[in-house]
């Protein structure tokens, strides 16, 4: 990975994420250091949202991280509703909820947590919004293994194709739980 890029894609395992990263890899956004325990707490909120759609359990939450390192504030929620509207993936539904509640501002201070790696459409929308971070559980490959069609473009590929985007990326948070959820989903 090019070290001049301002993002990091992890397969999990880093505690105190930004505190331990070299300055060259830290996002230009002013996100506070977020512990792995906090990432997991927020991912559990996204998992709870995902239970709202047992066939396609893609849930998301947008969180404003706490400057003190404690629990962040949940700013928006969303779950996949693509049967109603083909673009209402969990991330887009969550972004729409954020817009309804807070307007089109403050994106750089927010982190989106989602049960599945954002597809290219969702990641592109997050990039255009300038969201401060994206944290996902199951990878595109994990979702494909569960029999759910995916466009084979990763979040990393979208971010790398967007030289103006400097948000933080983290993958694999609670992936064992979400991989199981996708495999055991209602069909």
Image (cartoon, rainbow, N blue to C red):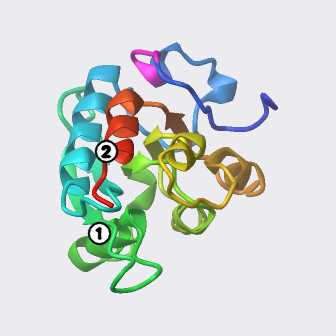
Q: Position of residue 78 (x, y in %)?
A: 27, 65
Q: Between label 1 and label 2, give the one nearer the viewer.
A: 2
Nearer to us in this view, 184 or 118: 184
Whether residue 187 sits left or right of residue 87 in the image: it is: left
Q: Is residue 142 magenta?
A: no
Nearer to us in this view, 91 or 85: 85
Residue at (46, 16) in percent of width and height: 14
Residue on which the image places disc 2: 184
Give the position of the C terminus as an image quadrant.
bottom left
Q: Dividing the picture into quarters, in which one does residue 15 lie?
A: top left
Q: CA distance from mark 1 to mark 2?
A: 30 Å
Please give the label number shown on residue 116: none
Residue on which the image places disc 1: 98
Q: Position of residue 30 (x, y in %)?
A: 46, 40
Nearer to us in this view, 170 or 153: 153
Span shown in magenta: 13-17
Residue at (36, 57) in percent of width and height: 58
Residue at (54, 69) in percent of width and height: 125
**Measured along the vertical axis of the image, is residue 136 above or below residue 38?**
below
Whether residue 86 sits left or right of residue 40 in the image: it is: right
Give the position of the N terminus as an image quadrant.
top right
Number of numbered callouts drawn: 2
SS assignment for the magenta stretch, majority: loop
**Measured along the vertical axis of the image, is residue 30 above or below residue 58?**
above
Whether residue 65 sits left or right of residue 176 in the image: it is: left
**Measured along the vertical axis of the image, is residue 131 above or below residue 44?**
below
Disc 1 residue crowd, few under 14, some 14–19, many 20+, Cα 10 Å: many
């Amino acid at each position: 990975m090019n070290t001049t890029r301002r993002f990091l894609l992890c397969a999990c395992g880093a505690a105190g994420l930004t505190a331990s990263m070299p300055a060259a890899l830290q996002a230009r956004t002013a996100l506070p250091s977020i512990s792995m325990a906090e990432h997991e707490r927020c991912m559990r909120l996204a998992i709870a949202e995902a239970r709202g759609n047992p066939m396609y359990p893609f849930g998301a939450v947008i969180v404003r991280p706490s400057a003190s390192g404690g629990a962040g504030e949940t700013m928006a929620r969303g779950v996949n509703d693509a049967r109603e509207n083909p673009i209402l993936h969990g991330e887009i539904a969550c972004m729409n909820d954020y817009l309804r509640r807070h307007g089109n501002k403050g994106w750089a201070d927010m982190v989106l947590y989602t049960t599945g790696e954002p597809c290219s459409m969702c990641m592109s929308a997050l990039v255009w919004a300038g969201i401060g971070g994206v944290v996902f559980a199951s990878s595109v490959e994990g979702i494909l293994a569960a029999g759910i069609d995916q466009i084979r473009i990763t979040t990393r590929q979208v971010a790398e194709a967007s030289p103006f985007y400097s948000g933080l990326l983290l993958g694999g948070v609670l992936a064992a739980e979400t991989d199981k959820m996708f495999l055991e989903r209602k069909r």
